[in-house]
Image (cartoon, rainbow, N blue to C red):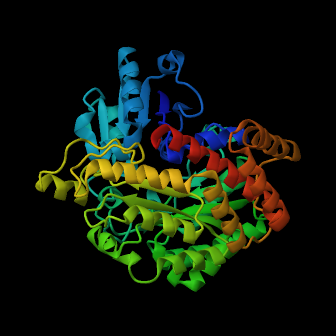
């Protein structure tokens, strides 16, 4: 059996980092970890190829080669997914579709031969058994959420790793909280399941053997969801890093209550976690309560951010406007919080009702849903009737983006972030002296010569070199990311 694993294209979004990746000479931020994991679950004798459409185009010859086309996607990849299915079916191929989007919207995939709802560890073995017996079904739905002890080491060698800026691993699935707008708890549940320590170290061994050095994204939606197990993992992770010369720096996502646990923060620092994404959402307590995000109301969030930064971790964060409880001055309050927290990479979006979330069910009951969600909350589209006037909400959102990604404003936050976040030695990376110099040269030419904001760039560059010379690589990464966000603001926010 010849299997073609296809990852559909992402539209140009804040999470694509597309405008920043060009400076590094990369095509995509992260590889499709789900498909690499599925590949490792297929029979060893099967041939397999991966086409990540974010790093190269899907050719007709790729499809013609295959006996089976297997596609996985998130909701934001829906349009590309539909085109892949259409092209594959037109060439007479059997198509299997799975992933997060299908797990909440399976009825919207009429052309696929087989649809996997839920996690592959619970559906793929049944499909393979039926395929061998010639008795396949159209729908395969997981009866329960599987233990992650069934999850194999991802097939990292299938990916063109030099085309990515970071690699990915997954430690846990699920989150103990019940945020109303979140689809993670609907897909993966509220009881976080984790891999064992030997499993995680085996994955890192595989990445190291594949030649990777640099950033590894622990893609958990809440890395500290199961604190007991994380506390057992981190000392072994730190020891593995020391034993192998600290080849990786880690990036992950966590809930704000991370700031309450000094011991956990210290363990993450020793394991070389350099960045963490927090779901801050809003500084308005009433809106947090409405969203059932009580974990963000237990303390001062600005203090929480500063605490995490003090442990050597740059804070990235998500922010949302559009809650029913948002006051008229929500836009100014979001801007002020982002400014005071020194979060350069502030991902601000409009509230969207994702399929089959608590929010989606409530709004449907209230008769307020007006469209399906595209999964993209930064394109100024609303899919439900808001309490605030829609035009005012969208214009206020645009004002936030124009302000926080104004070059002077952004560079000032970046400098303050550099000041607050201590660095325990240089971060590991795959760059040689030549590739690193080329990346800096591209940034200098694009941002310092060709860009209309070049004066602000050189002002930032001068201060970064004078005040934070040891963090020069970090400062250049932040400059590149700021350019990406500014380009997206020009596309969506003007």
Q: Residue at x 51, y 47 (%)?
A: 14
Say which quarter of the image contains residue 422.
Answer: bottom right
Q: For this view, does 61 lie left or right of residue 468? A: left
Total number of numbered labels? 0
- Seen in the picture, residue 366 relative to 279 is either above or below; the reply is above
Q: Residue at x 65, y 77 (%)?
A: 311
Say which quarter of the image contains residue 203.
Answer: bottom right
Q: For this view, does 58 lie left or right of residue 144? A: right
Q: Is residue 166 among the parts visible in the rendering? A: no
Q: Is residue 145 among the parts visible in the rendering? A: yes
Please state the horizontal and vertical placement of residue 30, each as a whole percent of the image: 58, 46
- Seen in the picture, residue 426 relative to 380 is either above or below; the reply is below
Q: For this view, does 154 lie left or right of residue 11? A: right
Q: Residue at x 53, y 31 (%)?
A: 53
- Seen in the picture, residue 151 relative to 329 is either above or below; the reply is above
Q: For this view, does 115 lie left or right of residue 273? A: left
Please state the horizontal and vertical placement of residue 239, each as a whole percent of the image: 71, 73
Q: Residue furthest right?
A: 433
Please state the horizontal and vertical placement of residue 455, each as a whole percent of the image: 74, 48
The residue closer to the viewer here, 371 or 10, is 371
The residue closer to the viewer here, 462 or 475, is 462
- Seen in the picture, residue 131 relative to 315 is either above or below; the reply is above
Q: Residue at x 46, y 71 (%)?
A: 255
Please state the horizontal and vertical placement of residue 308, each as a whole percent of the image: 59, 76
């Amino acid at each position: 059996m010849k299997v073609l694993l296809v990852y559909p294209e992402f539209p140009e979004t804040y999470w694509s980092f597309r405008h920043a990746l060009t400076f590094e000479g990369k095509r995509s931020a992260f590889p499709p970890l789900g498909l690499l994991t599925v590949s490792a679950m297929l029979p060893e004798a099967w041939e397999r190829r991966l086409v990540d459409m974010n790093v190269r185009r899907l050719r007709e010859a790729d499809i013609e080669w295959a006996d089976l086309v297997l596609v996985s996607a998130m909701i934001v990849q829906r349009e590309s997914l539909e085109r892949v299915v259409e092209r594959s079916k037109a060439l007479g191929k059997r198509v299997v579709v799975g992933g997060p989007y299908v797990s909440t919207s399976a009825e919207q995939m009429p052309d696929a031969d087989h649809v996997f709802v839920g996690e592959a560890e619970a559906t793929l073995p049944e499909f393979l058994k039926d395929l061998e017996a010639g008795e396949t079904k159209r729908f395969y739905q997981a009866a329960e959420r599987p233990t992650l002890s069934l999850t194999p080491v991802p097939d990292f060698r299938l990916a063109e790793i030099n085309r990515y800026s970071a690699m990915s691993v997954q430690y846990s699935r699920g989150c103990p909280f019940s945020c109303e707008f979140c689809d993670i708890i609907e897909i993966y549940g509220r009881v976080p399941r984790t891999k064992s320590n030997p499993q995680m170290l085996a994955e890192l061994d595989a990445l190291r053997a594949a030649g990777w050095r640099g950033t590894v994204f622990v893609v958990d939606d809440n890395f500290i969801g199961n604190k007991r197990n994380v506390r057992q993992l981190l000392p072994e992770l730190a020891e593995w890093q020391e034993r192998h010369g600290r080849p990786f720096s880690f990036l992950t996502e966590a809930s704000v209550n991370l700031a309450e646990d000094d011991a956990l923060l210290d363990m993450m620092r020793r394991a070389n976690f350099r960045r963490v994404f927090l779901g801050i959402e809003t500084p308005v307590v009433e809106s947090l309560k409405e969203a059932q995000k009580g974990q963000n109301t237990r303390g001062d969030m600005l203090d929480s951010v500063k605490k995490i930064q003090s442990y050597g971790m740059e804070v990235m964060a998500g922010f949302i406007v559009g809650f029913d409880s948002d006051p008229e001055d929500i836009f100014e309050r979001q801007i002020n919080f982002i400014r005071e927290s020194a979060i350069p990479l502030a991902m601000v979006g409009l509230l969207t009702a994702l399929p089959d979330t608590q929010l989606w069910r409530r709004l449907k009951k209230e008769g307020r849903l007006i469209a399906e969600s595209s999964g993209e909350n930064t394109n100024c589209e609303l899919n439900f009737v808001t309490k605030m006037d829609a035009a005012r909400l969208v214009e206020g959102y645009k004002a936030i983006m124009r302000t926080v990604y104004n070059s002077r404003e952004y560079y000032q936050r970046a400098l303050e972030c550099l000041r607050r976040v201590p660095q325990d030695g240089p971060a590991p990376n795959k760059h040689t002296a030549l590739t690193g110099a080329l990346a800096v040269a591209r940034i200098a030419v694009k941002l310092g010569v060709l860009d209309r904001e070049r004066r602000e760039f050189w002002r930032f560059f001068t201060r970064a070199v004078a005040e934070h010379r040891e963090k020069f690589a970090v400062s250049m990464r932040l400059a590149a990311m700021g350019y990406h966000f500014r380009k997206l603001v020009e596309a969506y926010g003007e």
